[in-house]
Structure formats: structure tokens, C-alpha cells
Amino acid sequence: MVDITSKSNSLREAVAVAVLKVSDLLTIHAVQNKTVPKGDVFEFSRAAGLLAIKRTSDVIPDCHPLPVEHASIQYQVEELSIIIRVEVRTIYKTGVEVEAMHGAAITALTMYDMLKPIDKGIEITNIHLESKKGGKTTFNETLTDSLRCAVIVCSDAVSAGSKEDSSGRTVVEKLQQYHLQASIYEVIPDEFALIQEKAQQLASEGYHLVLFTGGTGLSPRDVTPDAIRPLLSREIPGIMEAARNYGQQRTPYAMLSRGVAGFIQNTLVITLPGSTKGAAETMDALFPYVLHLFRVAKGMRHS
């Protein structure tokens, strides 16, 4: 199965439609009047469809088991057609479009089975996805080509040349996945004054996004959040709350991160852990969703 461990939970919705056509109005009347010999067609097929939704991963090998938090099946009769509309919702890492389509297919097939003794001309003519919402498809942001970005690595060891940087390069690579280029990539030591100087310089030069990696922990030299916080004109606590929550689901040590985020003038500054894994997971937690800030800021400037 596709690896979804790096994805974040979000509300996922899907609506699928199937159309069942009969050959005679008498069949429609039998369904509506509940006189079909095999029973109440609408209710039997609805039960089968709901079961199919919940058991999708059992019959479709590449589908992930997921919590179905809402499912509904509605019918609409139009002349000789019964339109089946299936809606599924979950809060999870992957979508529910296959679950919705599987539910629509089994609902239609159950109706076919119940009606074939009284109508030999039944057809299932159309099964398709009508709509889907959630995940990166919904929350993807496109204000990337005009953003000036910088990545600053805070590390005594890397700055002294005794250790190679990997976290900063990982952050640069993660940015590239969202069509963002780091026009500045620098390494500086864990010096309070130097960190502040670099942040203020980049803000004055009009950078939109500055990512500091390193110095967010609890060692005596971890001073990045302490240096950045006094400079923030508007702190955004929710950014790091989201990052820590994401990390906490993967390692209990995520609670030890002291990262901060917010604006210095018009520059969004985010402090990431110095470990390669921690930096990568923080990027996965925040992007592309954090880019919505720039869409909001752009709208405010033009209003």
C-alpha cells in the first residue's frame, strides 16, 4: 500500500453516484410500494451499501482501513432510472472516494439481485465519483512562485566544519516539493546575537519565508527560539502547536521542542528542530497548509 504515514489528518469527503435502469414502470412501482418478493429494495440495498463502505479495504487490496465517521445512501427515481447517491466522510490521512464508489456499486448490485426475478432488462449504467474534498487536493496553495525563501542552519558543529549539515538540506528539498526555492541557504553558529541579526537582515530585505533549523531543544546552546521570539511582531502559536502535535504522534520527544513561529515585519519566520528527522516531520506537518498565510496577506494588501 502507499505510505501515508507522513500525511496529516483532515476532513475527507466523497460523493459517488450509480444509476440503475429498469425496463418497465411496473418495476419502479413495485420498489416504491415495497411489493418486490425479495423484500424492501431500498432498505436492503442501503444496508448492503453501508456494509460495503465499511469493508472496502477487505476487498480492494491497496485501500487503507480507515474510520468511517459518516455514510449516507440516498435514492432518486427519475422515470425508469433509480439514481443512487452515496456520501462518505472521515477525518483521516487518506480519502474516501473508493469507499463511496464501492458503496454505490454494491448498493446497485444488491438492487439488481433483488429485482432480476421480476425484470430481466435491468442495467447498472453508470458508477462515478461526483465530488471529493479534503487533504492536499483541497488545501494546496499555489502562491509559491513569487515567495522569497531562506533557510538558515543554526549549529556550532556544522559552522565549525566538524559536522556536515543534513537538516538544512532536507528543508531545502522539502521546499522544492512545493515549488519553492531557497535563494539563501546559510550556516551560522548558535549565537543569540547572530541569530537575531540574521533574522532582522532577512526581514529588512523583504524575504517572505525564513526557516531556521536547529537550536530549538534544551541544551545550553539551544537559543534559537529565545533569539527569535522577542523579534516577532505577531506570534502564531498554532503553527508550532500543529508541528508538535504531528511530531508527538511519531515520537514522545516532540514535546521537548521549543520552536516558535510568527511574523517579523512581513516575513514569516519558523524555527525547526535541528535533527534531520525532526526538521523533515515539521515540514510535513506544516506544508503546504502554512502557505495559506501568504494568500491571506496578499488579499489584505489588495483590499
Image: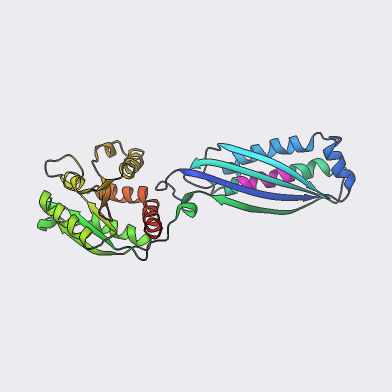
Q: Residue at x 25, y 44 (%)?
A: 259
Q: Is residue 193 magenta?
A: no
Q: Quadrant of residue 161?
A: bottom left
Query: What is the x, y in percent for residue 171?
Result: 29, 56
Question: Number of marks in the image?
Answer: 0
Q: Nearer the viewer, residue 69 or 265?
A: 265
Q: Residue furthest front?
A: 303
Specify how the rendered protein is coloured.
Answer: rainbow
Q: Is residue 38 toward the left or the right of residue 226 in the image? A: right
Asked whether residue 164 is in view, the answer is: no
Residue 184: give x, y in percent of width and height.
23, 64
> Main SS type for the magenta part?
helix
207 w.r.t. 6: above or below: below
Specify whether 10 is left or right of 173. Answer: right
Residue in the picture at 24% in, 37% down: 256
x, y percentage for residue 258? 23, 41
Residue 265 in the image: x percent, y percent? 25, 54
* Residue 210 against residue 45 in the figure, above or below: below
The residue at the point 58 percent across, 47 percent down is 14
Pick the residue in front: 192 or 82: 192
Specify whether residue 141 is in view: yes
Which quarter of the image is occupied by the C terminus?
bottom left
Quadrant of residue 166 in the image? bottom left
16 and 45: which is toward the camera? 16
Q: Is residue 108 magenta?
A: yes
Q: From which residue to which does the magenta span run?
A: 100-109
Is 174 above or below relative to 230?
below
Horizontal side of residue 48 vs 237, given as left or right: right
